[in-house]
Image (cartoon, grey):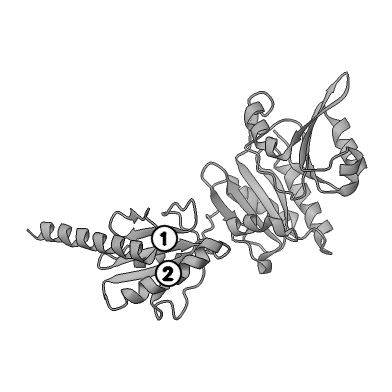
């Protein structure tokens, strides 16, 4: 069956969880976000409560495993050891894989939090062992990367998403209200294979092709870059990246340089706002030439290097075209 994750707000709640089972795991984190690959038949909790941390003498991010062997026994790991601990002991302790995670994005200090979280806990109990429920506090600024990963904006919360770990597929709960009925329907729809994968995209800007650098989004990406009549050099960027922001200036100059070429397009796409399943982007910035290949750019990030690469690829494409005609 397997557990749901419990948000611990008091010392009494922590002690109750520890005493309830032979084995319990509690994460003491300043930022609450747990992405366990496998979970056991044991109590699993997380807390950011200063009172709870003080009770157990916790002064930094830690993972404590409480085990009943005669009396009560506990072991502590530093935060940077947690991932290693999980991977090394999963075979011995974590025996029930839960590959589907249900994430609730909501501010924990909102007036509606108690009701929303109560519904969430009830759903977690119903789907115990099938899905792992994780709470993400949207008021915690250090969770910013998590919001970007799931494309969660301030206007979206409270929001519920399902993540399938093996495929990295994400699903959005259709209903806006986080009720037990809506959560139950969403989880059943996913488990029954009826939920549609969520691929967020920005709307296509009216002036997307008016500037030297063309603006791509998820909705127009494939139709533009896989147009065989065009050579499209794309920059995949993240707005929060300092390196990306610097390179956008060089990208503008490159686009100006090739603005008169009707069959060459210099484009950019914000990968934090648009999901692109067909393109694996592992780091930012990332550059690819379409549609030939496509060809990933691995050279230096200078105007001269970008231009030289583009010229070489244009020549290669032209030569290939001549051979086909012959």
Locate residue 223: give its quadrant: bottom left
Nearest to the observer: residue 261 or residue 106: 261
Q: Is residue 123 left or right of residue 316?
A: right
Question: Is residue 228 in view?
Answer: yes
Please provide percent x and percent y for residue 152: 63, 62
Nearest to the observer: residue 120 or residue 58: 58
Please provide percent x and percent y for residue 162: 61, 51
Nearest to the observer: residue 178 or residue 110: 110
Question: From mark 2 to mark 1, how far is it between C-alphas?
Answer: 8 Å
Q: Is residue 103 above or below residue 25?
A: below
Q: Is residue 324 left or right of residue 90?
A: left
Q: Is residue 217 above or below residue 89?
A: below
Task: Give the residue at the far top of this rendering.
Answer: 70
Q: Which mark is residue 250?
A: 2
Q: Is residue 291 above or below residue 57?
A: below
Please provide percent x and percent y for residue 114: 84, 57
Tell me which numbered mark, 2 or 1, is placed earlier along the sequence: 2
Secondary structure beneath dot 2 equals helix
Q: Residue at image x 50%, y 67%?
A: 246
Question: What residue does disc 1 label?
Answer: 301
Question: Is residue 217 in view?
Answer: no
Locate residue 279: give its quadrant: bottom left
Secondary structure beneath dot 1 equals loop
Tally of numbered tags: 2
Q: Residue at image x 49%, y 62%?
A: 237
Q: Residues within 10 Å of mark 1 (few under 14, many from 20)?
A: some
Q: Residue at image x 40%, y 81%?
A: 210
């Amino acid at each position: 069956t397997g557990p749901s994750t419990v948000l611990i707000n008091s010392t009494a709640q922590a002690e109750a969880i520890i005493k309830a089972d032979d084995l319990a795991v509690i994460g003491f984190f300043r930022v609450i976000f747990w992405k366990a690959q496998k979970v056991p038949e044991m109590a699993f909790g997380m807390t950011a409560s200063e009172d709870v941390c003080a009770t157990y003498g916790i002064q930094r991010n830690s993972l404590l495993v409480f085990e009943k062997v005669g009396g009560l026994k506990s072991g502590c790991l530093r935060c940077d050891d947690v991932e290693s601990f999980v991977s090394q002991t999963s075979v011995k302790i974590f025996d029930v894989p839960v590959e589907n995670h249900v994430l609730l994005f909501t501010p924990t200090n909102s007036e509606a939090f108690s009701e929303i979280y109560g519904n969430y806990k009830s759903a977690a109990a119903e789907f115990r062992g099938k899905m792992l429920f994780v709470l993400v506090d949207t008021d915690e600024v250090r969770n910013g990367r998590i919001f970007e990963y799931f494309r969660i904006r301030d206007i979206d919360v409270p929001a519920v998403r399902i993540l399938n770990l093996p495929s990295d597929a994400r699903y959005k709960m259709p209903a806006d209200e986080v009720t037990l009925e809506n959560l139950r329907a969403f989880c059943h729809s996913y488990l029954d294979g009826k939920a549609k994968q969520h691929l967020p995209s920005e709307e296509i800007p009216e002036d997307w092709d008016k500037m030297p650098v063309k603006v791509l989004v998820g909705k127009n990406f494939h139709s533009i870059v896989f147009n065989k009549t065009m050579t499209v050099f794309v920059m995949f960027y993240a707005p929060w990246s300092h390196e990306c922001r610097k390179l956008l200036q060089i990208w503008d100059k490159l686009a100006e340089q090739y603005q008169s070429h009707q069959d060459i397009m210099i484009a950019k796409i914000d990968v934090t706002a648009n999901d692109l399943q067909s393109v694996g982007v592992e780091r930012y910035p990332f550059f690819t030439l379409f549609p030939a290949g496509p060809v990933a750019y691995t050279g230096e990030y200078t105007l001269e290097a970008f231009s030289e690469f583009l010229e070489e690829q244009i020549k290669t494409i032209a030569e290939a075209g001549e051979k086909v005609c012959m």
